[in-house]
Image: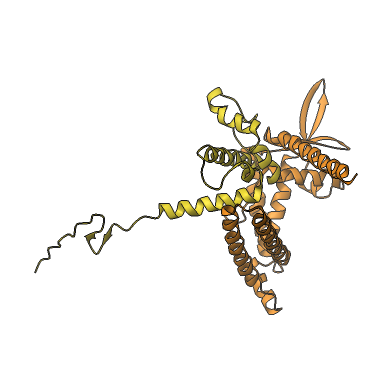
Chain colours: A orange, B yellow
Amino acid sequence: MSDKNELAKKLMQDIKMAEKGSAMQEVLKDNQIPFTVKSGTYRVRRPSYNEQLKVEDFRRKKYLKLLEDDTMKFRKQWIEIYKKKDIDIDKMEIDMRAIQEDIESLMLRLAETESPKDMETLKNEIMTLKEKQLLINIERTDYLSYSIEDQIMIAVNSYYTYIVLEKRIEADKKVVWEKVFEDYESFSNSIDSELINKAYYYINHIIYALPVFK
Amino acid sequence: METIIRKLARSHDCQFLYVRAKELKLKIFNNDSNLTKAQLIFLQWLHIYSSLYECIMRKEKYINEEVIEDDLRCDSYLLWRRKNKDKKDKPIQTKKNGIDMTGGIPTVIFKRK
């Protein structure tokens, strides 16, 4: 009976994986990604050249605004503030690099090993180290999340989403795509969390996080 | 996202499409330009897996289908291959203090007084 349960479990996992694969094929086939929420069919897409200029314009203005705010600090300044509280962000980065060296050393051994038992041991050791590294990275990211660099990235990604988010409208037997929000303020104040969350999720498939400083 | 993309990229269907795309003028995507992040990552992995399947055909060390199917073992192999390539590409010192080191015959240096 337990074998049957195990087989059923594996089959469900395979089905889920196949569904994810099909969903990903839909995402990959074009540079626009449609998705549905209760309120209808929407899409996000790659921006046009003019839209990219608008994003750059927004980024520059936002950056200036953050610079003028005395309560906003750069990552370097936050690191100094934390040092006074005995929180060493630089040491976290050194620790992450050291763990990465250990991971790579184990990976080189894994590449050359042919014994299944050794493979399993090495894989478990690598995963343990990766989890340790991830936890340090999450902690470091949390500490620096109020920095100007991080706040700019969040704001620009949000503006980007507002610019390219469109709704499917059927009019006179034609399908047109219209911008969902008239302006950025309406987007920012929207209470349709399902729409906004899904839009952010798919934007992550379209753009790399925009660099803060070129 | 990357796990699913890798699974697709190494599938036989996608590998066939990638290898034959140029020959048969097949389009991988609907768009010809302005690729998304996911599309770029997919192309990168198509290329990597294509090169790994060639390594298997050449019967190279430490690589087989099992390795390709396991992301961690695959990454480990790629790291190993990169490190070994770096070792092979390191240039051998051919001259030292003006003396040619490549040949086995000692050379004579004439100096002005």
Quadrant in the picture for residue A161: top right
Which residue occupies the foreground of this view, B109 or A139? B109
Considering only vertical position in the picture, is B38 above or below B98?
A: above
Which residue occupies the foreground of this view, A139 or A166? A139
Q: Is residue A43 visible?
A: no
Residue displayed at 68% across by 32% down: A29
From the viewer's perspective, is B17 left or right of A34? Answer: left
Considering only vertical position in the picture, is B105 above or below B112?
A: above
Q: Is residue A136 visible?
A: yes
Q: Position of residue A162 (x, y in %)?
A: 75, 44
Residue displayed at 82% across by 39% down: A11
Q: Position of residue A174 (x, y in %)?
A: 79, 22
Residue displayed at 66% across by 52% down: A116
Residue displayed at 73% across by 64% down: A142
From the viewer's perspective, is B79 left or right of A82? Answer: left
Q: Position of residue A196 (x, y in %)?
A: 81, 46
Which residue occupies the foreground of this view, A40 or B21? B21
